[in-house]
Image: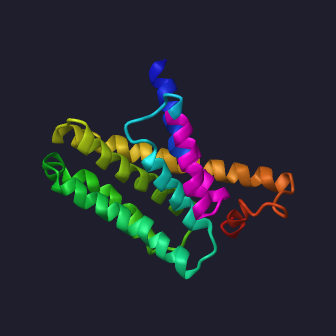
Amino acid sequence: MGEKVSYIYFLFFAVLIPLLGVNVKIRGSILGTIIFFAVRYLFGFGALTFGIPTACATLCWSVSTEKQTRYTNLFCGGINLLLPLSAMVLFYVHPVGKVAFVYSLYWLIPVVLYFFPRNIFNTALSSTFIAHSVGSVIWLYTMPSIPEKWIALLPIVAFERFLCAMVSVLAILLFSRVFSILKLYKNNNAFSFVRNYL
């Protein structure tokens, strides 16, 4: 029972909180995530990663849904290219990570998807692997581990991240449908980007 509750909790924070990035601009994503995790920490719900992976996933959604400008394209490149590639380098220079380097190859997914047209599934997959890369590096440097543990996680990561991406897509489509039924698109541009991909 405890494992089910913790996995639901994980899915909530790994999937639904990053979707805040759909609703608010980049600055709003940053501010909202900081406030959310500050409140969480103040009430004793702090975690090892302090919500940094979730904040990065939120930023990924935010830059993917904003109007394309030079600023957002630059920021999008930073989130989708520099973050996962930096995580790969940090993973490789760690003694345990160097032996289990194949684990970090997952983080090439957002890099590759950056060069494809933006759509909901690509953004969901990029978002979840960006959060995964940041969280994994934090975990690697703060918790004792062995290479075999990282290698053993490879199939679990594939399933878990695909599941996170699918839940994100379904949540976006559900929210979009609700907004459409309630006729909120005229007053709230939050999910209007979905219409471009349906």
Q: What's the residue at 76%, 53% (across, down)?
A: 177
Task: Evaluate whether residue 121 shows in this view.
Answer: no
Residue 151: name its quadrant. top left
Number of marks drawn: 0
Q: Is residue 197 above or below residue 58?
A: below
Q: What's the residue at 72%, 50% (across, down)?
A: 175
Q: Is residue 17 magenta?
A: yes
Q: Between 145 and 37, which is closer to the camera in this rendering? A: 37
The percent coordinates of residue 64 (x first, y second) are 56, 66
Residue at the limit of the structure toward the front, as seen here: 42
The percent coordinates of residue 122 (x first, y second) are 51, 62
Q: What's the residue at 26%, 40% (across, down)?
A: 142
Q: Quadrant of the C terminus?
A: bottom right
Helix, strand or loop for the magenta stretch, by majority: helix
Q: Which residues are magenta?
A: 16-41
Task: Evaluate whether residue 2 shows in this view.
Answer: yes
The percent coordinates of residue 76 (x first, y second) are 49, 70
